[in-house]
């Protein structure tokens, strides 16, 4: 994601750490109502996203490390997806802080937070594409070596994903700065770069999803593959729809917002009539931005649900782990009861 460039200030629409509102139009328009809506909407709902993401992804990591073979490529990708979502989530509290207080944590922290956020964003997208491609190969050519690959292949794949993500995120050390207590883009060109970079990655991910899942569905619809067909088709359809509904509106909105950046680089004055028209046209887009961003960012807490929690093996592991905790607690209570009875019969006072 890219950086935002303002605080909760009724004199400007600039929002905070990861927005794209540094435009000539935003500086000249009165958008107090938009800012108030964004502040309330964000501060109420984003903590929920953070809590659910941390809980869900940490639970995925615990279950995988406890019960699964992490040398398997499938398990390695799922584990790294959970870690990636936690990286993505780590930037959201800083974003909320900046939304209320402005950026008071220094320029180095500004750059580092943006870098971590970008790493989470890129790695999550790449991992989802790899998981989709891996599922495609498993269905279309189940005897392929890629399907059963373990060990070094998994390590190489994961190292490559993180190296590519870190490389793609490294420009954040160049294009972010602290200006008037705001963690911002260095200029509008870097803002455009961030927007179109996300648009390209979304389109690429969507192409991979549509191609792979359409081929998978065609294969599963054959008469020879009737067993468990309905459940698999529902899962694939759900994953595709959730990804599209989550990220498509956000990418459309930020693309439309980017159009307001171009006049800033080519003209310095706008007549009052044109400005009024632009202000009126941009306001619905600003409201749409806050709503669509929540949908997109919520994907980090939905990944555990749609990629792991719906799996039969994961549910069995989770049930086994919870039962183990229940037996352990029962054992502790039994020991406490026995100790209490023993202490009472012996006439001694005992407390746990």
Image: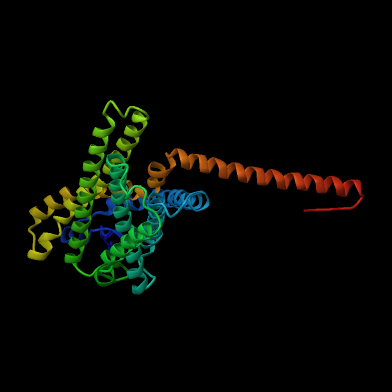
Residue 243 in picture, x, y percent from top left: 29, 44
Q: Can I make out residue 26 in this image?
A: yes
Q: Can I make out residue 284 in this image?
A: no
* Quadrant including the N terminus: bottom left
User: Left of 220 or right of it: where is 304?
Assistant: right
Closer to the camera, 37 or 303? 303
Looking at the rendering, which quadrant does residue 32 occupy? bottom left
Figure check: 82 above or below 111: above
Residue 175 in picture, x, y percent from top left: 24, 69
Residue 246 in picture, x, y percent from top left: 29, 44
Residue at the farthest right position: 347
Residue at the farthest top position: 223
Protein image colouring: rainbow
Q: Residue at x 49, y 40 (%)?
A: 315
Q: Residue at x 30, y 59 (%)?
A: 18
Looking at the rendering, which quadrant does residue 311 occupy? top left
Residue 160 in picture, x, y percent from top left: 31, 62
- How many labels sit on residues? 0
Closer to the camera, 150 or 102? 150
Looking at the rendering, which quadrant does residue 126 occupy? bottom left
Q: Residue at x 36, y 28 (%)?
A: 227
User: Left of 246 or right of it: where is 90?
Assistant: right
């Amino acid at each position: 994601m890219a950086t935002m460039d303002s605080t909760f200030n009724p004199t400007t629409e600039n929002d905070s750490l990861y927005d794209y509102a540094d435009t000539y139009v935003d500086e000249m328009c009165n958008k107090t109502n938009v800012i108030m809506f964004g502040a309330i909407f964000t501060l109420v709902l984003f903590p929920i996203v953070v809590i659910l993401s941390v809980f869900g992804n940490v639970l995925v990591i615990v279950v995988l490390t406890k019960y699964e073979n992490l040398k398997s490529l499938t398990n390695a990708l799922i584990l790294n997806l959970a870690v990636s979502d936690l990286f993505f989530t780590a930037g959201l509290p800083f974003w909320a802080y900046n939304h209320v207080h402005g950026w008071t944590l220094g320029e180095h922290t500004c750059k580092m937070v943006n870098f971590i956020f970008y790493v989470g964003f890129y790695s999550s997208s790449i991992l989802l594409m790899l998981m989709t491609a891996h599922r495609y190969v498993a269905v279309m050519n189940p005897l392929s070596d890629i399907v059963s690959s373990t060990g070094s292949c998994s390590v190489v794949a994961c190292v490559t994903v993180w190296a590519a993500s870190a490389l793609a995120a490294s420009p954040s050390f160049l294009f972010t700065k602290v200006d008037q207590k705001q963690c911002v883009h260095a200029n509008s060109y870097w803002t455009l770069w961030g927007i179109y970079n996300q648009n390209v990655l979304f389109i690429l991910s969507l192409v991979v999803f549509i191609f792979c899942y359409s081929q998978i569905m065609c294969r599963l619809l054959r008469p020879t593959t009737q067993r468990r067909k309905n459940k698999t088709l529902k899962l694939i359809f759900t994953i595709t729809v959730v990804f599209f509904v989550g990220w498509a509106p956000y990418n459309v909105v930020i693309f439309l917002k980017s159009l307001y950046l171009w006049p800033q680089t080519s003209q310095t004055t706008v007549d009052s009539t044109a400005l009024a028209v632009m202000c009126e046209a941009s306001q619905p887009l600003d409201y749409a931005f806050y709503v669509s961003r929540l949908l997109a960012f919520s994907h980090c807490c939905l990944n555990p649900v749609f990629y792991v929690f719906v799996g039969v093996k994961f549910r069995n592991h989770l049930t086994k782990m919870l039962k183990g905790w229940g037996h352990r607690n029962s054992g502790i209570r039994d020991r406490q009861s026995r100790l209490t009875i023993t202490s009472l019969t012996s006439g001694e006072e005992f407390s746990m």
